Image: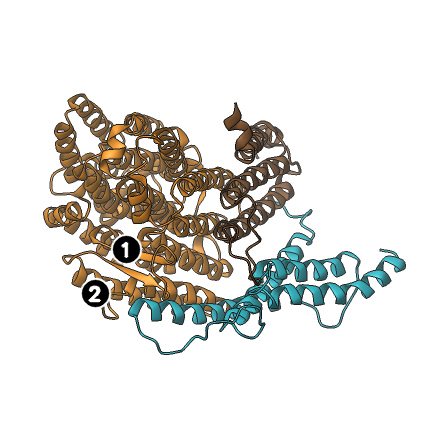
Amino acid sequence: MNIIGSTPLLLILLLLLSSFTLPFLKNPIKFSLPVLGALTILSWIHGLLFIGGEEYTIQAGHFEAPFGIMLRVTAVEIAIGLLFMTITTLVIWFSASQFHREVGKSQQKTFLILVHLLVASLLGIVYTQDLFNGYVFIEVSTLAACGIIVVKNKADNIKAAVKYLILSSLGSGLILMGIAYLYALTGYLDMTFIHEALIPIASEKSRMILISMVLFMTGAGIKSALFPLHIWLPDAHTAAPGASSALLSGLVIKAPAIYFLKICVLVYGYEMINQTAFLQLVLLFSGTGMIVGSLFARSQKTLKRMIAYSSVAQMGYIFFGIGLGTPAGMAIAVYHMIGHGVTKATLFLLASTFIDKLGKKDSASLKGVGREMPFEMAIFSLCGFSMVGIPILPGFISKWNLALATIETGQVWLLAIILVSSVLNAAYYFPITINGFFSEEDGIKPNNNPVAKVPLGILTVLLVMIGLLSGPILSLIEKALI
Amino acid sequence: MTILFDNFIEVASIILFAIGFTTLLVHNNLIKKIIGLNIMDTSIFLYFISIGYIDGAHAPIFTEGVTNYVNPVPSGLMLTGIVVAVSITAFALALIIRLHSIYGTLELDEIMKIREDGI
Amino acid sequence: MTIIVQNVVRIIVPFILIFGSYVTVYGHISPGGGFAGGTILAAALILERFTGIKREFVFSKELCLKGVAVSLIGYGILKGIAFMEGALHIHIISWPLGKPGEILSAGIMPVLNILIGLIVMMAFVLLFDLFNEDHSMEGQ
């Protein structure tokens, strides 16, 4: 394996080292943005070369598993890793021109150090094959995510960050308890070794395995906003500055979900999770979340709070895909993570643009904005269409394939939940689009600060490409998950 | 019943977890919530380290003529866990100091009342 | 603090610093290592700050932040070379394996322990200085 093959390890190391050199620089954005751009191009080269090939593992250091840490590279990890790197670079590019208007130039260095740490830890969660290594990276990402909320020093932010920190460390404690159960059963921490050691004892220790599954689901659910455990999310994502909300809602809540998916597929395996009642629990919570999240979003007045509740509903889709328990369901969960990451990041960046230019936070002030800012309103409408499920866009592909996978498992009555939640999604995205383009102006003139249109354009192009290329992407991901 | 007495360390750690969790939920004072979080984390460390213990084996430091050692891997892993718990406690305390300087109080119900009256 | 406390602390702190350095440097042959040793060193420096002893050379906030960053870069480069060598299965640097029981034997392990000890000590002193500032008059 050549040097391009070991790119994931190189990415994590270089991101961490660049984060440690940022305190010494006078102009941090001039160093951070080229570094992020170069590493994104490197990860795209690695992704395009290796995504069709067979899976391989990288060992960190000269010790093989189970004594050392191995990183696992398959199509799933490459796709999600590309998502994380690309979205971070585009969000930082967008916020380079807007950050000082919202927060203040003195905090930009702290923000960039935390963003580098955050992306390094998220890539670590995605690529790792070792349970405890994933736990350490989850903790680093929690601290960095709380940090980028309190970069803005207002009372709302501090309160939201305290709530997020306490609930999130409760979730990490539960994940660590699950790891302790698995270590007590098998004595290994590497995912493939635990799987081989669990198969002989699966029938006599089934209760302990069920307890560890539920601990993992609750812990990952708190951190990924599964339905009844999502209460920290609206405050945190509303109060944070614009670029932080985009990173939080697009990337940070996906990483514990992909960790949970890897545990379900690699540690337990499809037979073990289908034998217990565990998947019924996941389906129950995620199905309720899909509907209740949209219902809450309908009744919000603030634009960012509405988009934050929509995140709760969309994470319900992802856990619904995991809860189906088949390779097709898991592949749809991964595809929806990619599509939703791009869409939600774009929506939050647009929301911060609207708030910055109009000076008001509620969605009622967006009446007639489409005449003054047609570019931004058009992208907002496109993202809204993707969320609802208009064909070609990624939202439609996710819902269609999710319905197909549901019919395949034989539980046809779950289709009703998908249909109801799609209709509810339209109930809060379409009024903004219609009001934006077709109603009378509200009298608020936007101020003419320049906005970075190029990152928004690139994000839109990515969104449409993910929808158009969905066939090859889905088949590659499903091949890697069997 | 004998199972409970044989694995008394695990039982103690689950009871400590419950105590820490209840402290986190029930008390109003923010500092007491952080103390409850620490008790919870400590109980998980106790559980993990007790997995490695073998009755009658020696401490895992290389000495002459000893062949059976206690498993040192859980202790090493929990060292990382302790550092993580300390970092989270430090960050949470810094945020609570900032909250106290804004609202003047540390009790959660008084903070909610001040926010409802509208600052 | 009274002058008795200050004088007693002035006598005790060097011994605590020596003990903390011993725990850090002997980390590869006896229990301890970077984290525990760094905490003991930080405890000594924070004790000095509690009793109000003033010194000429002080670990100020900027020095602590820069020191932590430099040590982290050093640690990252050393560990990074070791990880990349393992990933690419090449052997550029021959890391010497250790002899059990000897202090100067385990390759770069003592160096890594000392770096972690410095990082932990400076991080704790920085946190104490940040907590000790007077925030009571700040508004929203």
Which residue is at a point 29% across and 38% down the rendered structure image? A200
Indicate the chain on which mark 2 is placed: A
Residue at the location (18% across, 21% down)? A413
In the rendered image, which quarter is residue C33 located in?
bottom right
| Residue under the point 62% across and 42% down | B102
Q: Is A299 above or below relative to A100?
A: above
Query: In this view of the protein, which residue sits in the foreground, A414 or A425?
Result: A414
Q: Residue furthest front?
A: B65
Q: Residues within 10 Å of mark 1 (few under 14, many from 20)?
A: some
Q: Quick check: can you spot residue A429?
A: no
Q: Earlier in the sequence, mark 2 or mark 1?
A: 2
What is chain B's hue in the picture?
brown
> Label 2 crowding class (10 Å Cα cut-off): few <14, some 14-19, many 20+?
few
Q: Position of residue A320 (x, y in %)?
A: 25, 32
Residue marked by disc 2: A45
Q: In the rendering, which numbered label is found on residue A129?
A: none
In the image, what residue type sits under mark 1? Arg
Q: At which x and y percent is residue C122?
A: 61, 63
Which chain comes out orange in the rendered image? A
Residue C133 at what x, y percent from top left?
Answer: 68, 54
Q: Colour of chain C?
A: cyan
Q: Amino acid at mark 2?
A: Ile
Above or below residue A413? Residue C131 is below
Q: Which residue is mark 1?
A: A72
- Whether pointer 2 and pointer 1 mark residues with C-beta atoms closer than 8 Å, the reply is no
Nearer to us of marks 2 and 1 is 1
Give how far across and how far down residue C123 sits, in percent. 59, 60
The C terminus of chain B - image quarter: top right
Q: Secondary structure at mark 1?
A: strand
Tag 1 subunit = A
